[in-house]
Image: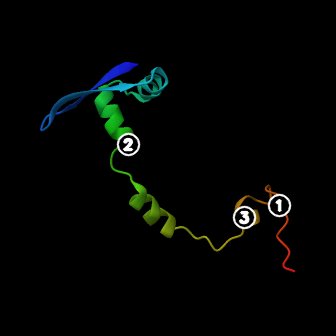
């Protein structure tokens, strides 16, 4: 397990344990001018389920799966008996 320091000027400093894999993933997204805490904030901050729902509501979903995938799905539609 690695410890990642998260710094927030108004809240002080915290540490959390993360797996080696997660630490490596965050570190791979780290920009040259960022701390790991800033990288984490950029990756997870500001976009939640409500934001996703708003984005989906703006999509034109009046197309079939076949149209959306240029026919590459190849699924046959269900039959109604």
- Whichever of labels 1 and 3 marks the residue nearer the N terminus, that label is 3
Q: Quadrant of residue 13?
A: top left
Q: Residue at x 46, y 22 (%)?
A: 24
With 27 as the anchor, is 41 left or right in this view?
A: left
With 79 as the anchor, is 48 left or right in this view?
A: left
Q: Residue at x 46, y 63 (%)?
A: 53
Q: Position of residue 69 (x, y in %)?
A: 73, 58
**Label 2 to label 3, Cα distance in Å?**
30 Å
Q: Position of residue 68 (x, y in %)?
A: 70, 62
**Label 2 to label 1, Cα distance in Å?**
35 Å
Disc 2 secondary structure class: helix
With 34 as the anchor, is 13 left or right in this view?
A: left
* Residues at discs 1 and 3 in contact (Cβ within 8 Å): yes
Q: Position of residue 51 (x, y in %)?
A: 40, 59
- In terms of depth relative to the viewer, which is nearer, 41 or 5? 5
**Label 1 to label 3, Cα distance in Å?**
9 Å
Q: Residue at x 35, y 34 (%)?
A: 40
Disc 1 residue crowd, few under 14, some 14–19, many 20+, Cα 10 Å: few
- In terms of depth relative to the viewer, which is nearer, 13 or 26? 13
Q: Position of residue 11 (x, y in %)?
A: 14, 37
- Whichever of labels 2 and 3 marks the residue nearer the N terminus, that label is 2
- In terms of depth relative to the viewer, which is nearer, 12 or 52? 12
- Quadrant location, the N terminus: top left
Question: Is the residue 62 above or below the residue 12 in the image?
Answer: below
Read off the residue under disc 3: 65
Count of numbered circles on the image: 3
Disc 1 secondary structure class: loop
Read off the residue under disc 2: 44
Label for residue 75? 1
Q: What residue occupies the far bottom of the structure in this picture? A: 81
């Amino acid at each position: 397990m690695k410890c990642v320091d998260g710094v927030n000027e108004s809240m002080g400093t915290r540490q959390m344990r993360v797996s080696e894999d997660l630490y490596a993933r965050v570190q791979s997204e780290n920009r040259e001018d960022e701390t790991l805490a800033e990288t984490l904030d950029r990756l997870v901050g500001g976009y939640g389920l409500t934001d996703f729902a708003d984005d989906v509501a703006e999509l034109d979903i009046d197309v079939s799966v076949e149209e959306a995938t240029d026919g590459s799905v190849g699924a046959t539609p269900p039959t109604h008996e």
